[in-house]
Image (tube, grey):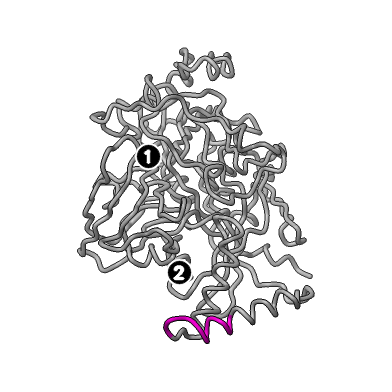
Amino acid sequence: MQHKLKNASLISIGVIAGVAISLGVTATAQREAKPTLPLEELRQFSEIFGSIKTNYVEPVEDKKLITEAISGMISGLDPHSAYLEPDAYKELQVGTQGEFGGLGIEVGTEDGFVKVVSPIEDTPAFRAGVKAGDLIIKLDEKPTKGMTLNDAVKIMRGKPKTDITLTIVRKNEAKPLVITITRDIIKVQSVKYKLLEPGIGYVRITQFQEHTTENVVKALNTLVKENKNQNLKNLVLDLRNDPGGLLNAAVGVSAAFLPERTLVVSTDGRSEDAKRKFIAAPEDYMRGGREDHLAHLPSFAKNIPIVVLVNGGSASASEIVAGALQDHKRATIIGTQTFGKGSVQTILPLNSNTAIKLTTARYFTPSGRTIQAKGIEPDLIVEETPEGDLISHVREADLVKHLPNQQEKTSENKTKKSNKINENKDQKPVEFGSANDHQLNQALNKLKGLPVLVAKNKEKAEANKVNKP
């Protein structure tokens, strides 16, 4: 049987309320193998169904009961599997195009509430001051306790220029915060870039979308022009707070800096379709018959010294790129431990309107590491400020029912936590790429052969003794 994942459509992380969904692939469900149905359990389900129909205080439609049963069955597996009703399925397909309506936040769930994984830059939520780790307890006047993620997203969605009020519980805040946000069309600029200094380029990827690889190539060529038509000598690739995105885009960005046909990432699951190796080659980063944009890549990209910046908001596709460049010793990874989203979700269409998003595999870096519930550990641990991180990032290991890391039976306990959080409430969030960006400044020190100021925590300092270029 031909590989069903070969020409698959590969998707993003989270759930978009302005969000992204989890790294995954679109494939057709295999119907050849039909497992034996558990008759006793099905009889029990039938009895419960009948009891609800007969005794519940109000009449309930059959369709609602079946839909809720399906949704509960799938969502109970892990944080990333879900039943996609028509609106959610359409939203997932639209989300990878880089334009959608909403607030601009990536969300998950925790203890029955909606939790902010990361606000997306230059969006209404970001400008309103929503932060990673915020627990949304109310949407307008509706409590989120027990609300499904898809239902919460539907409420947060709406016509542009309409308002929604979020009631938020934030760590170290005595009272809930009430924030009113005006919805807007969210246009995520996937790639941002600038010339930091003569010969040193800066490329930031905010989310891996359909045109990310193409835009990275354009960014590098534009930086050459801005550098007086001289090749760049050093590059900073910024993946901080990048929640992930399309797998083929992650392979394409990795391929821009790796030798041809180098292994980028592999996946492994129970089915043969879930066992894949993705290499730095057009067949694995191009979709359909589109142009190979890496054909226009500047020649220096394969050899230029690179520093990759990551943090707790770097997830999924971001971790694939960081892991590939780290394993092949193609870049130095600087920052803090990444999110740890190392599972693959397959989109299995049920009909033209609905589908299930099912976790079908774990992905592995070229050296065979799985980062599930662990993340990528930087070569040099550098926090947001010299005093520590400004916020505490939610990570995969913090999510209820997260898929365990099979390579470490106690990965939840071994996952390193951030250094002490800087609790100065008056300190503004770091503007990535600015002159006051501490992590970026340490990346420049690394590229210039200067000492890097690593985290003050002694344990981390010991783990990063090699802080000289």
Quadrant that contains the N terminus: bottom right
Task: Give the residue drawn at x 67%, y 63%.
Answer: 5
Q: Is residue 14 magenta?
A: no
Label 1 and label 2: CA atoms lie apart by: 32 Å
Residue drawn 71% across the image and 74% down it: 41
Whether residue 439 can be seen here? no
Residue picked out by circle 1: 193
Q: In this orientation, which residue lies closer to the viewer: 177 or 255?
A: 177
Left or right of residue 143: residue 335:
right
- For the residue marked with disc 1, what is the amino acid? Tyr
**Most foreground residue, 52 or 71:** 52
Image coordinates of residue 451 in percent, x first then y, are 47, 12
- Please state the horizontal and vertical placement of residue 3, each as a whole percent of the image: 73, 65
SS of the residue under disc 2: helix
Q: Which of disc 2 and disc 1 is earlier in sequence? A: 2
Stretch of the chain drawn in magenta: 49-58
- Looking at the image, residue 167 sits to the left or right of residue 395; the answer is left
Label 2: which residue? 88
Q: Amino acid at mark 2?
A: Ala
Q: Which mark is residue 98?
A: none
Quick check: 232 above or below 216?
above
> At which x and y percent is residue 292?
55, 55
